[in-house]
Amino acid sequence: MQTQAFNIVLPIPLVRQVDKVAESEYRSRSDFIRQVLVEYLAKRLAWTKIVQVGRKIGREMGIKSEADADRIFFEYRHGKRSNTS
């Protein structure tokens, strides 16, 4: 894997926290920050996919606004709507 170095400016208290956790895990600062970024980006990608699926389902159900979604959730929770409605 090719790598590229870059500078980042962080508040000193944050650097201390990073160093403390990295040291407790016997990792370098760079390795720790790399892993944190990988995990964050994976979670963000997963969330983006969830949102896309939700939007698709919303369009299929004719949901056009937050108010529509709230109404449908309310009806479902109070037995006024079934899964297939």
Image (spheres, grey):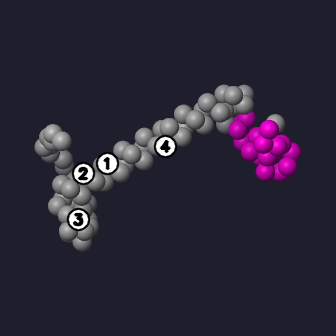
> Which residue does the numbered mark 4 point to in the structure image?
47
Query: Badge 2, how many Cα within 10 Å: few under 14, some, many 20+?
Result: few
Separation of marks 2 and 4 at Cα, in angstroms? 20 Å
Amino acid type of disc 1?
Answer: Val
Quarter occupied by the C terminus: top right
Q: Mark 3 or mark 2, which is nearer the start of the sequence?
A: 3
> Which residue does the numbered mark 3 point to in the structure image?
22
Separation of marks 2 and 3 at Cα, in angstroms? 11 Å
Number of the label disc, if any, that sits on residue 77: none
Q: Mark 3 or mark 1, which is nearer the start of the sequence?
A: 3
Q: Position of residue 60 (x, y in %)?
A: 69, 28
Range of magenta residues: 67-84
Q: Is residue 40 magenta?
A: no
Give above or below for 9 relative to 64. below
> Which residue does the numbered mark 1 point to in the structure image?
38
In the rendered structure, are the residues bearing label 2 and label 1 in contact, judged by CB atoms less than 8 Å apart? yes
Residue drawn at 23 percent across, 65 percent down: 22
> Which residue does the numbered mark 2 point to in the structure image?
34
Closer-to-camera residue (20/60): 60
Amino acid type of disc 4?
Answer: Trp
